[in-house]
Structures are given as C-alpha cells and as structure tokens.
C-alpha cells in the first residue's frame, strides 16, 4: 500500500495511510496496528510527522496509544458519541445525504465554536494557525484543499471538554468527508474567488477563537456556513 506524500499535509497523508491499513487488514477494536517506529520506517517520514498523524487519529477516536513493552498503536473502541453521530445519519437511507449531514454539521458548528472560544489555549491557536497556512498553500485545488479543511475543523472540535459534543461532531464530519471523497471533481471544485472567500471565513473563525469574544461567534459561524 503506497503512501501518497503528494498530500498537502504529510501528517494527513500518514493518518490516511494508517486508516487504509486498518481497513485493508480488517483490524477491529483492540487490534494492534504497530509502533510509531514501525510507521516511521514504512512511511519514511520524520518522527514529528508520525506523532502529528497519531494525534490526528487519536483526536478522531480512531486509535489509542498504549505504553510499555507490549504497547504501541491500537484500533480504538468506537466512542459512543461517534456511534450516535453515525446513527443520526443512518436513520433511513434517504436522510443520509451530504446535504442533510452538512445541515446537521452547521447546527452543531456554533456549539463547537463557542466551546473552542471559551476553552482555547495558546497551543490550540498556534495549531489552528498552522492549519490555516496549509489551507492557504493549497490554493483552489479541491484535492489538496478539502482534506485540510476537514483537519482544521477536527482541530477546533478537539478543544472542547464536552466529550459528547466533540465525538458526535467528529463522527459527523467524518461521514461528510467519506461521502465527498466519492464525488467527481466537477462537484467538489473550488473556483479561485470561492477559495479566497473560504480562506477568509476560516481566518475569521480562528481570530474569534483567539480573542475569546463569545459575542462574535454567531456572526463568524453564519459567515462560514454561507461560504460556498
């Protein structure tokens, strides 16, 4: 299974590689994936990149990390909140569409942003600024831009101490991400002007989170949700 290092973020590429490995090997909750050293050797990337990929998957509830001689990376038990998010989307096949999922995501966005604005730490803001830099670097290429946008929203959601909100939101975004992956490029394209508007909307989200100003959350979320 080749590792696509043409991805806009090497950590994102390694995270995707791990997820594909889990599916390819048919691993279940509690099964051992390997060690960080194994992943570094197989992928050929730096230790810091592997650590970031592991953090991404841990935050999404996909893997767990155990220390000790028999430790390493393991497939995580499915979080009840993620199960709830998937259940909400699976109530009838007609309801489980990208449009419906996006509407539900938009509804939760304000709650997630309020939590992030209230509980953010300096390192959270720094991480989000790094995500923004990579989004800007992706330009208007949807193949590079969309994975970084998902990563950006995942990172915002990890700030909240509300476990149910976090895991439900991450499960929801994961569903949308999986569905969008199967759409033709013509349906996911992002013209230059729209890409610029999208970047500006995400910059505004981070600015509000950093400011801690809860009174501005509704405004910036509305702008973000209205962005093509």
Image (spheres, rainbow, N blue to C red):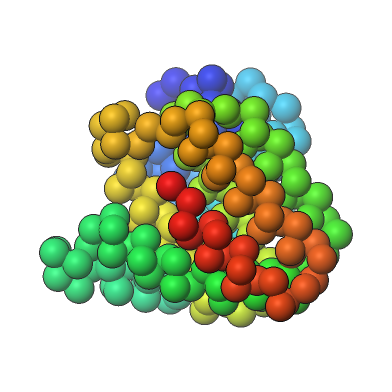
Q: Which residue is painted at 30% across and 48% down in the image?
A: 179
Task: Name the residue located 67 percent from the left edge and 24 percent from the top edge.
Answer: 45
**Is 119 above or below relative to 205?**
below
User: Toward the viewer: 66 or 47?
Assistant: 47
Q: In this view, does 106 lie above or below 149?
A: below
The N terminus lies in quadrant? top left
Which residue is more in the foreground, 169 or 218? 218
Point out residue 17 in the picture as x, y percentages from the top left corner: 48, 34
Please tell me whether residue 135 is drawn above or below residue 173 in the rendered image.
Answer: above
Q: Nearer the viewer, residue 210 or 170?
A: 210
Residue 223 location, x and y as percent?
Answer: 55, 59
Residue 182 shown left or right of residue 218 in the figure: left
Q: Which residue is drawn at 66% across and 58% down?
A: 205
Q: Can residue 116 be seen in this view?
A: yes
Question: Would you say 125 lies left or right of 149 here?
Answer: right
Judged from this view, the residue extending furthest toward the front is: 193
């Amino acid at each position: 299974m080749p590792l696509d290092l043409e991805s806009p973020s090497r950590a994102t590429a390694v995270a995707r590689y791990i997820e594909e490995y889990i599916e390819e090997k048919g691993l279940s909750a509690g099964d051992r994936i390997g060690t960080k050293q194994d992943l570094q050797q197989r992928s050929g990337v730096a230790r810091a990149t592997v650590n970031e990929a592991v953090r991404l998957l841990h935050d999404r509830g996909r893997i767990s990390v155990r220390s000790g001689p028999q430790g390493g990376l393991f497939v995580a038990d499915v979080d009840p909140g993620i199960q709830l998010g998937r259940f909400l989307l699976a109530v009838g096949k007609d309801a489980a569409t990208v449009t419906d999922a996006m509407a539900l995501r938009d509804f939760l966005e304000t709650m997630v942003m309020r939590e992030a604005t209230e509980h953010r730490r300096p390192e959270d803001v720094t991480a989000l600024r790094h995500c923004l830099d990579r989004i800007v670097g992706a330009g208007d290429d949807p193949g590079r831009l969309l994975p970084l946008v998902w990563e950006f929203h995942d990172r915002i959601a990890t700030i909240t101490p509300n476990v149910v909100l976090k895991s439900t939101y991450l499960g929801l975004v994961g569903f949308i991400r999986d569905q969008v992956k199967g759409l033709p490029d013509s349906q996911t394209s992002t013209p230059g002007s729209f890409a610029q508007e999208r970047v500006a909307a995400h910059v505004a989200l981070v600015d509000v989170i950093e400011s801690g100003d809860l009174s501005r959350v509704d405004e910036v979320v509305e702008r973000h949700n209205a962005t093509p």
